[in-house]
């Protein structure tokens, strides 16, 4: 079964991501705010995609606050996890932000929250997972 990790601090967004990924795509979904849990799952070798919130209010790594851009850079910087596609999700999307966030993070794609077009999100996820397979 295809496994996806959703790193999200907003409970409503987390539920929406889980429902769309499980019900529409049949994926197994781990929702977490924990960088340690993210890296443990990613290093296991069976994660097909990470959906990463940009601004993580409660996430810390080694005692330091960390956001989705930094976590994505870390994932992309490790040999064992670099090939996992990352879809950045942010509520703070202004013109030009997508390009800047993708460049800063090394993420593979980007989506604005709130997720209004569920079908577009599902197609974006499907394309990223198929491309990486």
Image (cartoon, rainbow, N blue to C red):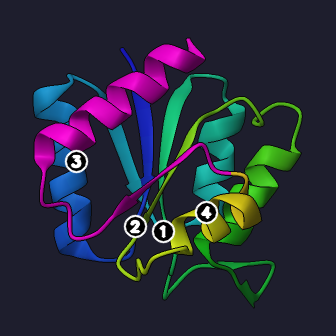
Q: CA distance from mark 2 to mark 3?
A: 11 Å
Q: Which one is nearer the viewer's eye here, 76 or 116?
A: 116
Do the residues bearing badges 1 and 2 touch, measured as CB atoms within 8 Å? yes
Residue drawn at x 45%, y 15% is: 130
Residue located beneath label 3 in the image = 18
Secondary structure state at the residue bearing disc 2: loop
First of labels 1, 2 by sequence position: 2
The residue depicted at 53 percent of the width and 17 percent of the height is 131
Q: Which residue is mark 2?
A: 8
Q: Secondary structure at mark 1?
A: loop
Q: Pointer 2 and pointer 3: residues touching (CB < 8 Å)?
A: no
Label 4 to label 3: alpha-carbon separation: 26 Å
- Evaluate if marks 4 and 3 touch, with contact meaning CB atoms under 8 Å apart: no
The residue at 19%/33% (across/down) is 22
Q: Is residue 68 left or right of residue 89?
A: right
Disc 4 versus disc 1: distance between alpha carbons? Answer: 24 Å
Distance CA(mark 3)–CA(mark 1) = 14 Å
Q: Position of residue 123 (x, y in %)?
A: 26, 30
Q: Sequence-wise, which precedes: disc 4 or disc 1? A: 1
Q: Nearer the viewer, residue 129 or 120?
A: 120
Residue 40 within the magenta-colored segment of the rendering: no
Name the foreground residue: 68 vs 115. 115
| Residue at the spot of label 1 | 33
Dot 3 falls on a residue whose secondary structure is: helix
- Which mark identifies residue 99? 4
Q: Residue 132's x, y, as percent? A: 58, 19
Residue mark closest to the camera, 1 vs 2: 2
Q: Secondary structure at mark 4?
A: helix
- Between tags 4 and 1, which lies in front? 4
Magenta range:
107-133
């Amino acid at each position: 079964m295809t496994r996806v990790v959703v790193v999200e601090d907003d409970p409503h967004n987390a539920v929406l991501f889980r429902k769309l990924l499980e019900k529409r795509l049949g994926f197994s979904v781990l929702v977490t705010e924990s960088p340690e849990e993210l890296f443990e799952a990613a290093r296991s070798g069976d994660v097909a995609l990470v959906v990463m919130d940009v601004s993580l209010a409660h996430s810390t790594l080694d005692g330091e606050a960390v956001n989705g851009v930094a976590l994505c850079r870390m994932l992309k910087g490790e040999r064992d996890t670099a090939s996992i596609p990352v879809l950045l999700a942010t509520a703070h999307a202004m013109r030009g932000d997508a390009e800047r966030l993708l460049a800063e993070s090394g993420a593979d794609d980007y989506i604005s929250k709130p997720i209004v077009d569920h079908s577009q999100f599902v197609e974006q996820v499907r394309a990223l997972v198929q491309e990486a397979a």
